[in-house]
Amino acid sequence: MRTHGLRLVLLALLPTMALGLLEGLYCGKENCYDVLGVTRESSKSEIGKAYRQLARRYHPDLHRGAEAKAAAETQFKLVATAYEILRDEESRTDYDYMLDNPDAYYAHYYRYYRRRVAPKVDVRVVIVVVLTIVSVIQYYSGWQRYDSAIKYFATVPKYRNQALEIARDEIQEKIQKKGKNRMSKNDQRDELERIIRRVIEEKMDVKGGYAKPTLWDVLWVQLIICPYTILSFIVWHAQWFWRYTVMKQPYGREQKLYLIRRHLGMGQHQFEAQEDKLIEEYLHLKLWKRENFVAWKAEQDEEMKKKLAENPRYKAYRRYMKNHGPGRITFED
């Protein structure tokens, strides 16, 4: 009896297995071409015409009665599914592959669900949107850093007094001019702060990571001019090799600063953020020469060791590391 029942099941499944139709994929056990009443040789326009005719015939709103509506809705969904599969060239190709290769079960599932879960948006559009968002955030965050730097300089007595000295006449003129309109103390203070901020922005050359942002620093612009940047990099190094390695020409100020910055291991913005007095000291010590830099670095390290040795906090830290630091096993809680 069991053998006879198994045979009946196999005989029932044989037609659909032979056709390569799988439940849950595409039109299920129905052939999408048969659902629309077309053939595999039908054109896209013929498929669309057949779909519109069947959609009008099986539209649920055109049927009365619960059973008739339910049957029409089921057939309408099947027709819509078949049209969605056959109107797209890639999905139609995958469906034809399933019909021609009924034994490749895993390949059918992979092709079907790969298309179902794949993003519908063009990857190029996503890249453009992401780059635009990053560029906007980068630009406005640069302005925020620059604004915070100007606010900080306006609170430092050294720079604040210099700004007041530079804009003294302008401040007196504006206060006297607006004094006729009886400016309140708050208005006078706000006007004074605006003048100080403007003078600091004009006179203060903020460098480094807090420098005033420009459009040339934005990621989008950097990507656009990337070929020019790479070419300039190659030309610059070629000129450097020819002038100062082959021809042995003397270094200029910019070349000396470049060598000093490279010896210090600093980026351009970080090096430019150094005080002018300190940079002039580097030039006076001729730190662009490797031997001078090595000797100067050794002196700096020795001075740092002496300062740390005399620092009571560092002594306490060394005692703690000696008694409780890594590598020492204790039974203290």
Image (cartoon, rainbow, N blue to C red):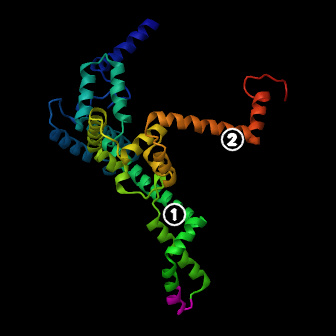
Q: How many marks?
A: 2
The part of the chain drawn in magenta is 175-182
Characterize the local packing of mark 1: few (<14), some (14-19) or many (20 or more) Cα atoms within 10 angstroms: many
Residue beneath disc 1: 150
Residue at 43% over, 39% down: 262
Q: CA distance from mark 2 to mark 1?
A: 33 Å
Above or below residue 109? Residue 259 is: below
Q: Main secondary structure of the magenta part?
A: helix
- Which amino acid does the dot numbered 1 rest on? Ile
Report the mark closest to the observer, 2 or 1: 2
- Return the x and y of residue 291 as percentages of the image width and height: 47, 33
Above or below residue 31? Residue 47 is: below
Element at label 1? helix
- Return the x and y of residue 159 as percentages of the image width and height: 55, 66
Residue at 53% over, 74% down: 165
- Return the x and y of residue 207 as percentages of the image width and height: 46, 55
Can the viewer see residue 275 in this picture?
no
